[in-house]
Amino acid sequence: MSKEKTDQSAKKVARRKRITKLLKIILALLVIFLINLYIILGILYKKENFTVILESDFGRESNLTIYENLDKKIERTFLKSKDIDSFSDISIKWIPEDINNEAEGSHNGTNYIAYTFYAENQGQDTINYNCKIEIDDVVKNVDKAVRVMVYKNDEERVVYAHSNSTTGKPEEGTIAFKNDKLVMEQLNENFKVGDLDKYTVVIWIEGNDSDCTDNLIGGEIRMHMTLTEEHISENN
């Protein structure tokens, strides 16, 4: 009888431990969900035109860091450009050709947003990281005439835009948005310790776009860029 009671007691202890462990996992997942929800709501309701978010590999210490200034590497997980109260349509020809070397951080011009920042592997492991730009909010379909120009390491320059509403083909000199919400997405592989990527993002309304009409007056757009780290083994 005593042995039976002991077995039952042991089973109760084991069951209590399992329940406690499960509750801890649920609590951790709930905390992660609330953090992500806070970030998303912050993007949507702070009305910032363009932001950059850093996400690390789940359960690991972050190797990837982002910052605005090479001389003062103040690490952040969230960067934001200075806002522009209103846009008027312009031409890409009005944007300085060397805008990627113009300044660091926000360097907006008349009727365009320009933002330069850096991503560096300051950890101890080689990583991959995914880079994407997403549209958070649009008013009056202003995204139909928006251009997003991305410089990477002063070598690559790509201009993204919605496909032409009439032909369905990419606008001249551009790569079409992935879909209505996703501007671009790129996987950066084998980003080694000490590697550094420089990004400049420029956003404007293209006056030569056939979708740039008076109907866009009063429109708004907000978007963000996310860098998501993925850990890989050095052996791979």
Image (tube, rainbow, N blue to C red):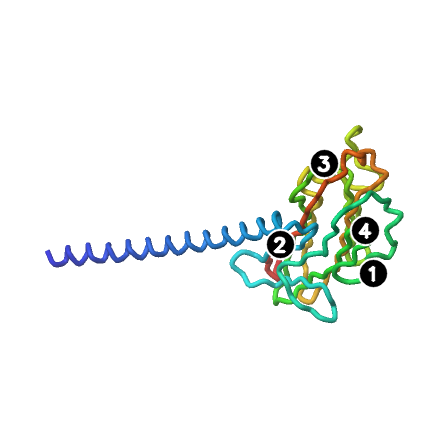
Earlier in the chain: of badge 2 and badge 4, it is: 4
* Distance between the alpha carbons at the discs numbered 1 and 3: 31 Å
Q: Name the residue under label 2.
A: 228
Q: Name the residue under label 1.
A: 101
* Distance between the alpha carbons at the discs numbered 2 and 1: 25 Å
* Distance between the alpha carbons at the discs numbered 2 and 4: 21 Å
Which tag is nearer the camera, tag 4 or tag 3?
3
Residue type at mark 3 is: Asn
Which tag is nearer the camera, tag 1 or tag 3?
3
Query: Which numbered tag is attached to residue 141?
Result: 3
Q: Name the residue under label 4.
A: 157
Earlier in the chain: of badge 2 and badge 1, it is: 1
Q: Where is residue 153 in the image (x, y as percent from the top left)?
A: 78, 58
Residue at 23%, 58% (x, y): give it.
10
> 122 or 133: which is nearer to us?
133
Earlier in the chain: of badge 3 and badge 2, it is: 3
Residue at 71%, 43% (x, y): give it.
220
Earlier in the chain: of badge 4 and badge 3, it is: 3
Which tag is nearer the camera, tag 4 or tag 1?
1
Residue at 58%, 62% (x, y): give it.
62
Image quadrant holding the N terminus, namely bottom left
Asked if the residue at tag 3 contacts the one at tag 1, i.e. Cβ–Cβ closer than 8 Å, the answer is no
Asked if the residue at tag 1 contacts the one at tag 4, i.e. Cβ–Cβ closer than 8 Å, the answer is no
Q: Few, some or many C-alpha atoms within 10 Å of disc 2 (few <14, some 14-19, many ≥20)?
A: some
Kind of element beneath mark 4:
strand
The image quadrant that residue 140 belongs to is top right
The image quadrant that residue 52 belongs to is bottom right
Earlier in the chain: of badge 4 and badge 1, it is: 1
As drawn, is 190 to the left or to the right of 8?
Answer: right
Residue type at mark 1 is: Asn
